[in-house]
Amino acid sequence: MVLKVGQLIEDIATGFAQAELFYGHGTDNPYDEAAALVFHVMGLEHAGDVDQYQHEVTTEQHERVQLLSVCRVETRKPLAYLLKEAWFAGIRFTVDERVLIPRSPLAELITGHFEPWVNQDKVSSILEVGTGSGCIAIACALEFPTAQVTATDISPDALEVARLNTDRYQLAEQVSLVKADLLDGIEGSFDIIISNPPYVPDHESAELPSEYLHEPVLGLFSGADGLDSARRILQDAPRLLSAGGILVLEVGAQWEALEQAFPSLPFIWLEFEHGGEGVAVLQAVDLQQ
Ligand SMILES: C[S@@+](CC[C@H](N)C(=O)[O-])C[C@H]1O[C@@H](n2cnc3c(N)ncnc32)[C@H](O)[C@@H]1O
C-alpha cells in the first residue's frame, strides 16, 4: 500500500504520544512534532498547500523518518538538534548542542518592528546580549536592514554557530559577533538593547525534563533565583541606550521575582498572540533613575 505524508505524520505522532516526550523546543504537541520531522525529511514547506499531505513517501524517506523518530524517543534529544535546524521569526537557523534552541516569544515583537515602542525609521543600532544561534540578532537585522546589529555571547562555541547563521544570510557586515560577558567592555549607543539571557534558577536543574539536559548549561541557568544575568543587564544598559532607546528583557516565569527585586522600575510586560510570558520593555528614561 502507498504511504502518504498525512498517514506517516499520524503514525509518528501516535508513537510520540505513547512515549510521553516533552515538547517546548519549537512545537508543543506530538502531531506538530511529527509533522516537523516528516516535512523536514521530505523537503516540504510548512507554508505550502494542503496537497502536500497527499504526497507519496518513498521507502528511503520512510526509513529515515523512522530512524529519527526512534532516536527522538530513545535519547530524548530535542528534534531541532537531530535535524540540526530550527525556525525563528519565520526563518530557518542552523542549530546544534552548542546553542539553545530558538523559541523566544521575542520573535513576535521583532517581526512587529517593536511597535509601538520605537519609530522603525529611526532605529540605526541594535545590541543583542546572549545571542546563542544568532536568531534574535539576525531576525532584527532582516527586519531593520539599515541598522547595525551587535550580537554578544560569552560562549565561543555559540558564536561559531551564530557565525554559520550570519554567513547563511550574508549578514556578516551588518551583524557584528562579539565575545563578551554580558555588557562588560561594550561601547556605543543603541536604540534597542534586546536580551533573552539565561533565567532558570539553578535549583530547578534537577526538575527539568530530559530534553533540556541536551542544551548548554550557559543558555539556561543564572544563579539562585535565575536573575543574575538580568540584574547585571538592568544595571549596565542605561549607559548604552540612546536617548529614546528601549531595553527589551526576557525573564520568562521569573517576571514577578524581577518586579519584586526592582520595585521602582516601571516594567511593561508584553502579551503575545502566539504565547510566552515574562518579556519586559523599559525606556531609557525610566532606567536613568
Ligand atoms: C537563553 S540563551 C538565548 C540564546 C538566543 N538569544 C535565543 O534566544 O535563542 C542565553 C544565551 O546567553 C549566553 N550567555 C550566558 N551567560 C552569558 C554572559 N555572562 N555573557 C554573555 N552571554 C551569556 C549563553 O551562552 C546563551 O547563548
Image (spheres, rainbow, N blue to C red):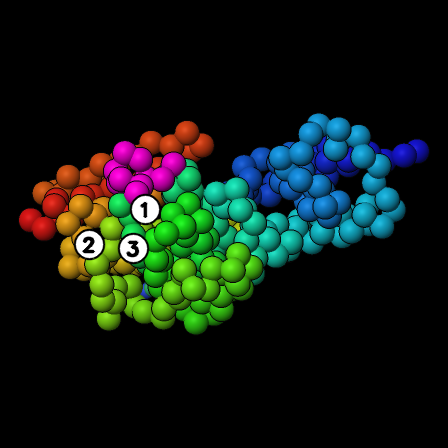
Point 82% across, 45% down: residue = 62
Residue that sits furthest to the left in the current view? 289
Residue behind label 1 places its C-beta within 8 angstroms of ligand 1: yes
**Type of secondary structure dominating the magenta stretch:** loop
- Residue 218 higher or lower than 138, as above or below: below
- The foreground one among 169 and 103 is 169
Q: CA distance from mark 3 to mark 2?
A: 10 Å
Where 182 falls versus 85 (above or below)?
Answer: below
Residue 125, label in figure: 3
Crowding at dot 3, Cα within 10 Å, few <14 / some 14-19 / many 20+, comes out as many
Mark 2 is on which residue type? Leu
**Residue at x 41%, y 50% (from the top left corner):** 145
Of the image marks 3 and 1, the number of the one nearer the N terminus: 3
Q: Label 1 crowding class (10 Å Cα cut-off): few <14, some 14-19, many 20+?
A: many
Which stretch did the figure color magenta? Answer: 112-121
Q: Element at badge 2? A: strand
Q: Answer with left or right where residue 279 lies relative to residue 158.
A: left
Closer to viewer: mark 1 or mark 2: 2
Observer-side mark, 3 or 2, equals 3
Rendering coords of residue 148 (x, y %): 34, 57
User: In whole angstroms, how far apart are the C-alphas of marks 3 and 1?
Assistant: 20 Å
